[in-house]
Amino acid sequence: MKIANTDPEVDDIKQDIKSLKNHAGELTEHVKADGREKVEEMTNRAHEQLHHLKDAGREKIRTMESYVQENPVQSIVYAFLGGLAASLLLGRR
């Protein structure tokens, strides 16, 4: 059996708790929305950087290919020296 409480302070406290629950729910929704926006913004930024890096890498490859075509003997010497250095470094294990 429930006893009816007519104390206005208790009713005010109940109303405040109810209001607090509603505000907490609204705040949670706002935080979720802000989080989603941040994730979307960071994802877009990461995709932009990825495309920029891909383009920069392709440009470097084109530059290297044109250098090799213009200086084939020098390129072969550099490749040989790089392979020799790697062989010496890895052979010392």
Image (spheres, grey):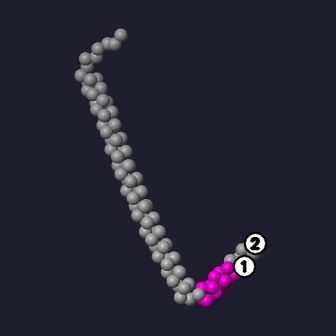
Residue 17 x, y percent position in the rendering: 31, 30
Could you tell me which secondary element the residue under label 1 belongs to? helix
- The residue that disc 2 covers is 93
Please tell me which residue lies in front, 9 or 78: 78
Which kind of residue does numbered mark 2 sit on? Arg
The quarter of the displayed image where residue 21 is located:
top left
Please tell me which residue lies in front, 56 or 30: 56
Residue 49 x, y percent position in the rendering: 43, 65
- What is the C-alpha distance between the residues marked 1 and 2? 10 Å
46 relative position to 15: left or right: right
Please tell me which residue lies in front, 60 or 16: 60
- The residue that disc 1 covers is 88
Q: Residues within 10 Å of mark 2 (few under 14, many from 20)?
A: few
Residue 7 x, y percent position in the rendering: 25, 19
- What is the quadrant of the N terminus in the image? top left
Please tell me which residue lies in front, 64 or 25: 64
Q: Is residue 2 above or below residue 54?
A: above
Which portion, as a residue range, is magenta? 73-84
The quarter of the displayed image where residue 89 is located:
bottom right
Which residue sits at x=34%, y=41%? 29
Which kind of residue does numbered mark 1 sit on? Leu
85 relative position to 31: left or right: right
